[in-house]
Amino acid sequence: NVRIAHLTCRPDPVNMAVFMVPGDGKTRVVLKWGDVPMNLDVYVLPRGVTDLEGSFASWLTVAGGQPQTWNANEDPYAWYQERVLMSTSGQFSARVSLDRNDAIHGTRDALLGQAVNGPETVTFEQLLPGSYEVYVNANPPDESRGARNATQVFGSRFDVEVYLGDGVSSTRQVDTAVVSAAGAIWTYIGQIRVYLRTENGCRGVSRMQSPIGGVQFCYEWVRFNSQTAYPLEGVGIIKALVLSVVPSA
C-alpha cells in the first residue's frame, strides 16, 4: 500500500512516498530506486515448480489463458505485461502478482510540482514447491527492441526488500539487497525456495502449521545479487548466501 505525503515546510516543500507492508502472512518483494533511470522492472520466474503430486506445475493467467512473454517458447514469468500468474493443485492456488508498477521516476507531479518516486511490489501467495527467481531489469525506452536487445542500463543504486510470510497473519522482513549495478541491464536478486517440511522441520528456527489441508511448507530466501545476461531462457546457478528461512502456507 503506497501513500504520498506532501509536507509544507520552509524553504521548500518535501514529498515522501510511504510504503506499508500489511501483516497478512503474505510474502512480498519491494523494489525501490531513485530518479535514474525512469523505469526499472521486477521479473519473477518460477523454475522447477511442481504440484503436490510431483508433476510440473502449469501456469495460467487470471483469465485462464497462456501467459505472455517477451519471446516465444519461454517459460512463464510475472512482469509488467503479465502481472498475475496462477497455478492450482488440490486446495492450493499459487499466485504471483505484480501489485504495483512504477514507470515515472524522476518526473514531476503536475499537482505537487516535485518528483515522487514510488516502489514496485510483488506479492506471493500459497506457493507450490520449487524456486521463484527474482530479477530487476532496466526497462528499455524503445520497447520495440525487446528485453533481450535492450540498451537502457541501471543509472543509480536500487534496493530490493524481501518479506517472508507465514501464510496466516505474520510477515517479517528478512533481507534488503542494496544494488549498485551501473552499466548493467539485468540483475539477479535472488530466489524464494519452497519445499515441503519434513519431520526434521525447516532449515531455520521458525515453524508454523499450514492452515490448508494440514500441509506444511518452508519458505527460504536465497540472495544472489549478481549481474546477469538475458535470464528468461535460463541462467547458470552460482554459489549463493542463504539468509533466512520461514515456513509458510
Image: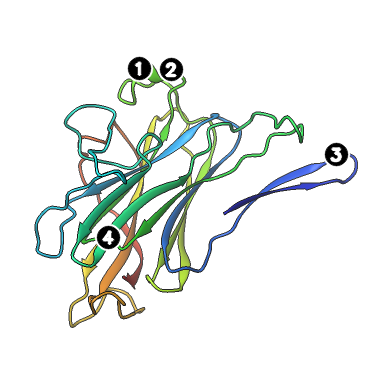
Which secondary structure, mark 3? loop
Choose the circle earlier in sequence order: 4 or 1.
4
- The colour scheme used to paint the residues is rainbow
Which secondary structure, mark 2? loop
The residue located at (45%, 73%) in the rendering is 169
The residue located at (30%, 47%) in the rendering is 85
Give whichever of 183, 67 is nearer the camera. 67
Residue on which the image places disc 4: 93
For residue 236, say whether it is visible. yes
Which secondary structure, mark 4? strand
> Residue 202: x percent and y percent?
26, 75
Instruction: Identify which amino acid the numbered label 2 is placed on.
Output: Asp
Q: Tell me the quadrant of the picture where the N terminus can be found.
A: bottom right
Q: Is mark 2 in CB contact (under 8 Å) with mark 3?
A: no
Residue on which the image places disc 3: 12
Distance CA(mark 4)–CA(mark 2): 36 Å
Residue 35 shown left or right of residue 144 in the figure: right
Choose the circle earlier in sequence order: 3 or 1.
3
Residue 202 shown left or right of residue 199 in the figure: right
The residue located at (28%, 33%) in the rendering is 68
Q: Is residue 232 above or below residue 90?
A: above
Given this view, does label 4 or label 3 mark the residue nearer the observer?
Answer: 4
Q: Is mark 4 in CB contact (under 8 Å) with mark 2?
A: no
Instruction: Identify which amino acid the numbered label 4 is placed on.
Output: Ser
Q: Is mark 4 in CB contact (under 8 Å) with mark 3?
A: no
Residue on which the image places disc 2: 142
Given this view, does label 2 or label 3 mark the residue nearer the observer?
Answer: 2
Residue on which the image places disc 1: 145
